[in-house]
Image (tube, coloured by chain):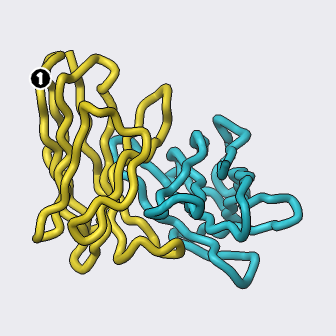
Chain colours: A yellow, B cyan
Amino acid sequence: DSGVTQTPKHLITATGQRVTLRCSPRSGDLSVYWYQQSLDQGLQFLIHYYNGEERAKGNILERFSAQQFPDLHSELNLSSLELGDSALYFCASSVDPGWTDTQYFGPGTRLTVL
Amino acid sequence: AQSVAQPEDQVNVAEGNPLTVKCTYSVSGNPYLFWYVQYPNRGLQFLLKYITGDNLVKGSYGFEAEFNKSQTSFHLKKPSALVSDSALYFCAVRDRMGQGGKLIFGQGTELSVKP
């Protein structure tokens, strides 16, 4: 157990809908990263927050947004869902965004869009 | 651009035999390299990382990795494979070009250990 929690574990929804994925980092970690894992794209970085502020964006669609709250948990919001958004969404946390710091991953949320 | 490559989609090993999962990297400057393992329906678990120093890095569950700068490789190894080692293994490099230090992952290697 990495200490990173994600809810829900599974999410099944329809095209056009909006969902929110939640991540609680390890105690003491200030950085939260979101990644998407799909069969065709592999593991892709989406977005990074550090202590409540956005630090970097990756291949994140405009329909997707995220935020990190004062208690350091983070939410990833996915809207106008399409079939191709079906994937595993992971969050990872680390103490700080330093290059040598280890990112610890949560168990993921499996999103299925029907 | 920084990248890692895992040249083998699948590696098959008999239990008790040594295993190697290959990874090569392409980065500007010194690389910060990581190995993660993903069991079915589970998240990624950190195995080990290379930052600097000794080229042989020891990690969790008896795994180790050898950093080779001249061959730009960071192969994952274990002297004696277990059936329970069967999983998906990812090599990753820290992105030092942009802000935030995201991980850039290889495509993964499926390790199958047969009794």
Q: Secondary structure at mark 1?
A: loop
Q: Position of residue B66 (x, y in %)?
A: 74, 68
The residue under the point 67% across, 40% down is B12
In the image, taking residue A89 as reference, residue B74 lies left or right, namely right
Q: Position of residue B86 (x, y in %)?
A: 53, 47
Q: Residues within 10 Å of mark 1 (few under 14, many from 20)?
A: few
* Quadrant assignment, res B13: top right
In the image, taking residue A29 as reference, residue B91 lies left or right, namely right
Chain for numbered disc 1:
A
Query: In the picture, which quadrant includes the C terminus of chain A?
Result: top left
- Residue positioned most to the bottom: B53
Query: In the picture, which quadrant includes the N terminus of chain A?
Result: bottom left
Amino acid on which disc 1 is placed: Gln
Nearer-the-camera pick, A30 or B8: A30
In the image, taking residue A50 as reference, residue B107 lies left or right, namely right
Mark 1 lies on residue: A17
The residue under the point 30% across, 54% down is A91
Residue B112 visible in the current orientation: no
Q: Is residue B23 above or below residue A110?
A: below
* Quadrant assignment, res A21: top left
The residue under the point 28% across, 75% down is A29
Nearer-the-camera pick, B84 or B110: B110
Residue A64 visible in the current orientation: yes
Q: Is residue A95 above or below residue B35?
A: below
Q: Position of residue A19 (x, y in %)?
A: 13, 34
Nearer-the-camera pick, A96 or B111: A96
